[in-house]
């Protein structure tokens, strides 16, 4: 049975969350993180002595020397090759340490995984057609996700539907501010140079929808398979597919 369309009029821009909105919520934890762990030994081995990796290697080694947790693997007395960092990196990942250098390293491994076809972003089937339709109608499209902007661009650059990056004119991550704060959405619409009511924000998270609505944006919830929150009782419309959204651009 076709879903009842949700109509939103007079729009200039659509801003989309990723996880749980355009992509299954477990792609990062269920696919990307395990891929980085699995690929790590071979990846480090192949890049032994690579000058491009050296600043990262030194930052990770310094963090190892500075680590005070007695449960951490013992740091080497002096220098270490990239491959010799492996026990430390595995420990950091197992303990979910948010080290920037570790995030950067994971990003490099994902970039290679996407480039050689081992990774592909599993967008929901309705996403690419909707994005193309809205873009063709003159709506500006932007991403606001807690994943870093480079990670967002890797994801949309390597979808089952091809490279969707040219459809987007804005990329925002939490450097803009937390996704649960209205101020972040005020800054976002400023950056897009649109009045808040001319922007539609789509997300699966009620904290984000609430914050965006408080900033004056139009909001719509996304209910996708695997999402923890069905958004059944919020004050916003909810769709199960982007195909159910009938968006009308504002007159030029
Ligand atoms: Mg989400």
Image (cartoon, helix red, strand yellow):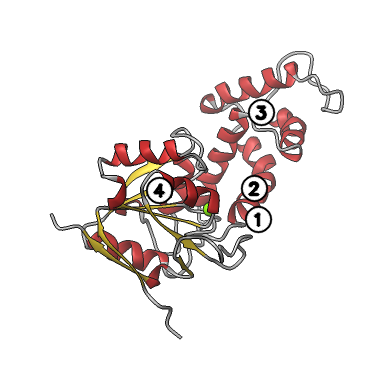
Placement of the C terminus among the 4 image quadrants: bottom left
State which tag comes first along the sequence, 2 or 4: 2
Q: CB under 8 Å between callouts 1 and 2?
A: yes
Mark 1 or 4: the one toward you: 4
Q: Residue at x 22, y 62 (%)?
A: 137
Q: Which residue is mark 4?
A: 143
Q: How many discs mark residues in the rendered view? A: 4
Q: Nearer the viewer, residue 22 or 231?
A: 231
Query: Looking at the picture, how far across and down is residue 239, in whole percent?
Result: 46, 68
Q: Which residue is mark 2?
A: 33
Q: Is residue 132 above or below residue 66?
A: below
Query: Looking at the picture, how far across and down is residue 114, in whole percent?
Result: 50, 51
> Alpha-carbon distance for marks 2 and 4?
21 Å
Mark 3 or 1: the one toward you: 1
Q: Residue at x 62, y 40 (%)?
A: 43
> Alpha-carbon distance for marks 3 and 2?
19 Å
Q: CB under 8 Å between callouts 3 and 2?
A: no
State which tag comes first along the sequence, 3 or 2: 2
Q: Which residue is mark 3?
A: 82
190 on left or right of 81: left
Residue 30 image label: 1
> Alpha-carbon distance for marks 1 and 4?
22 Å
Element under disc 2: helix
Element under disc 3: loop
> Alpha-carbon distance for marks 4 and 3?
34 Å
Mark 2 or 4: the one toward you: 4
């Amino acid at each position: 049975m076709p879903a009842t369309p949700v109509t939103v009029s007079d729009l200039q821009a659509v801003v989309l969350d990723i996880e749980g909105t355009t992509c299954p919520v477990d792609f990062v934890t269920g696919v990307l993180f395990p891929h980085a762990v699995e690929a790590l030994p071979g990846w480090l081995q192949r890049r032994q002595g690579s000058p491009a990796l050296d600043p990262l290697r030194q930052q990770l080694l310094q963090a190892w020397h500075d680590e005070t947790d007695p449960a951490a693997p013992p740091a080497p007395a002096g220098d270490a090759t990239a491959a010799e960092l492996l026990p430390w990196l595995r420990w950091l990942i197992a303990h979910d340490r948010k080290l920037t250098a570790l995030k950067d390293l994971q990003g490099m491994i994902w970039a290679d995984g996407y480039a050689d076809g081992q990774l592909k972003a599993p967008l929901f089937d309705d996403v690419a057609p909707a994005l193309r339709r809205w873009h063709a109608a003159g709506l500006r499209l932007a991403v606001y996700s807690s994943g870093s902007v480079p990670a967002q661009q890797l994801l949309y650059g390597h979808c089952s539907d091809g490279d969707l990056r040219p459809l987007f004119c804005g990329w925002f991550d939490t450097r803009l501010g937390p996704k649960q704060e209205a101020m972040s959405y005020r800054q976002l619409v400023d950056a897009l140079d649109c009045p808040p009511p001319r922007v539609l924000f789509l997300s699966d998270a009620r904290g984000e929808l609430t914050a965006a609505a408080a900033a004056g944006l139009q909001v719509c919830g996304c209910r996708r398979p695997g999402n923890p929150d069905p958004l059944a009782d919020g004050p916003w419309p909810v769709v199960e597919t982007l195909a159910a959204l009938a968006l009308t651009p504002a007159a030029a």
